[in-house]
Amino acid sequence: MSADVLDVAVIGGGQAGSAAGFYLRRSGVEFAIFDAQDEPGGAWPHMWASLRLFSPARYSSLPGRPMPPWNRGYPPAAHVVDYLTAYEKRYELPIHRPVRIEAVHRDGDLLRLDSATASWRARHVISATGTWWSPYLPYYPGRGDYQGRQLHTVQYHTPEDFHGQRVVVVGGGNSAAQITADLASQATTIWTTPRPPRFLPDDLDGRALFELASRRLRRLRDGHADSGGIGGLGDIVAVPAVRDARDRGLLHAQPMFDRLTATGIAWRDGRTEDCDAIIWCTGFRPALSHLTPLGLRDGTGHIPTGGGTRALAEPRLHLLGYGDWTGPGSATLVGAGRTARDAVRDITSQLAPE
């Protein structure tokens, strides 16, 4: 790679970083993408085997190249990996892997990116590291006393790993519902949620959810009252496997337990359940540790962007794919493309000679 200053450095080579690369390639600026993984696909190669998208392939594409059809329902994670691999080859994206950017520093008029062995300087940085690499585990009394197996969503792979076991699944969102449904054929499951699970209407898929999120953002920008967006309708997308398990009566949620014991979980009323494993489907936080030297995070752990992708306190930094605070649906395949387009348009307008 040239030692010259890059116009744009992209950190993360998954769906958001690849979408940014598409628009950067079209803009003609000098850029590079640094990806910490050994293979293409971002987080997708690391997800559980039965995971399916929320939408058909035709509504799950990055800009410029449609995702190939998948004729057996919603596409699995492996199909997404194949698509992203072909995508970066098709557009000859300059992705350097495995390169883990450990810190970004201000360096005069530039930003400096440091790995363990090298440094690069850039006029602008796009951070697209997502959330998968920063799983959240809540504290519960007795968690250190429990003698069984504890794992987070990121460590779950196949239901066969739990054949014949009693498994507690914790969480009221999509991952918890999908994993509980996935386990039903192999294990006895106990699904615990902080509130009764709310399933979205069966006819809502990822495309409709993205449009709802976009509509909500437009209304907020126009000064209308917050409608609650998707959260006002429910928390769990009824993908076919979840819908089937729900209709068969396999998704009965229990209230959250109050503490862990050496052998399982316990509620305040004295009821207990022994279990072999606990799967914490308790969400993620933005993977932003590489930006710590810039001192930009607020009390929520986010970096304020004012509703777009540009960091308010550091205009040379854009953030893609971390959730609705970096653009509606920005953590989805279709949403990543729209927010990447806006970010690159903003960056290139700043790079243009006056």
Image: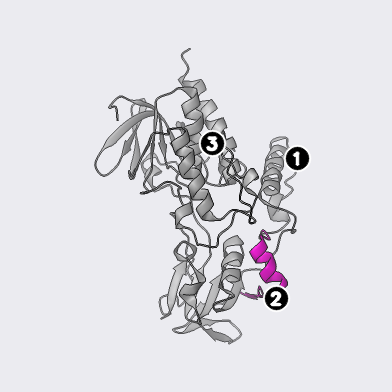
Q: Please state which amino acid type lies under the numbered disc 1.
A: His
Residue 35: quadrant of the picture: top left
Q: What percent of the width, then of the height, locates residue 114?
A: 30, 39
How much space separates mark 3 and mark 2, taking CA atoms?
A: 42 Å
Name the front one of labels 1 and 2. Answer: 2
Magenta part of the chain: 237-256
Residue 309: quadrant of the picture: top right
Q: Residue at x 46, y 84 (%)?
A: 263
Secondary structure under the numbered disc 1 in the rendered image: loop
Q: Is residue 73 above or below residue 105?
A: below
How much space separates mark 3 and mark 1, taking CA atoms?
A: 22 Å
- In the picture provided, is 224 more to the left or to the right than 312? right
- In the picture provided, is 34 more to the left or to the right than 14? left
Q: Residue at x 43, y 42 (%)?
A: 13
Q: What percent of the width, then of the height, locates residue 4?
A: 30, 24
- Quadrant of image for the N terminus: top left
Q: Residues within 10 Å of mark 3 (few under 14, many from 20)?
A: many
Q: Please state which amino acid type lies under the numbered disc 2.
A: Gly
Mark 1 / mark 2, whichever is N-terminal: 1
Residue of label 2 = 249
- In the picture provided, is 127 more to the left or to the right than 198? left
Residue of label 3 = 309
Residue of label 1 = 224
Q: Residue at x 53, y 32 (%)?
A: 343
Q: What percent of the width, then of the height, locates residue 15?
A: 50, 43
Marks 3,2: beta carbons within 8 A: no
Res. 86 in view: yes
Residue 217: quadrant of the picture: top right
Q: Please state which amino acid type lies under the numbered disc 3.
A: Thr
Res. 302 in view: no
